Amino acid sequence: MVGGPLAEGTPEAIVGRLNAELGRIVKLPDVQEKYANLGVSTEHSTPAYVLERMKLEAPRIAAALKAAGIEPGIACAFFSP
């Protein structure tokens, strides 16, 4: 998943524009090639889908970070509700 957190209350127009631009960028041939060389496939989705995936994945990722001894307050800030 590629994306980034935005401040709560970010206007929908800005969220939509950023989403559209990320969607355009991940389809560029050179970007596709770079991800393919890393063994990663790309997909474009909606901000709502990404948020839902983050909520579903957060407990698993937090557990892995905890098992590795990484402090949740620092490493898991991105996954906080």
Image (cartoon, helix red, strand yellow):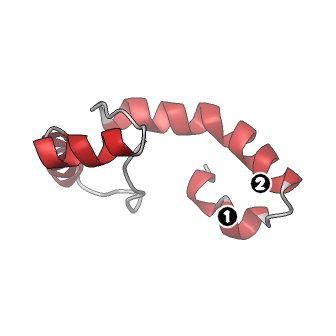
Relative to 14, residue 16 above or below? above
Question: Hey, which residue is sitting farthest front in the picture?
Answer: 37
Left or right for 75, reference 10: right
The x and y percentages for residue 26 are 21, 42
Q: Which residue is mark 2?
A: 65
The x and y percentages for residue 74 are 69, 70
* Residue drawn at (78%, 46%) of the image: 64
Left or right for 49, reference 24: right
Answer few, some or many: residues within 10 Å of disc 1's Cα (few below 14, many 20 plus, some between 14 and 19): few
Q: Nearer the viewer, residue 10 or 32?
A: 32
User: Would residue 22 be seen by someone viewing this image from the given angle?
Assistant: no
- Going from N to C along the chain, the mark reached first, 1 or 2, is 2
* Residue drawn at (38%, 33%) of the image: 48
Label 2 residue SS? helix
The Cα–Cα distance between marks 1 and 2, rounded to whole angstroms, is 8 Å
* Residue drawn at (79%, 64%) of the image: 70
Q: Which residue is mark 1?
A: 75
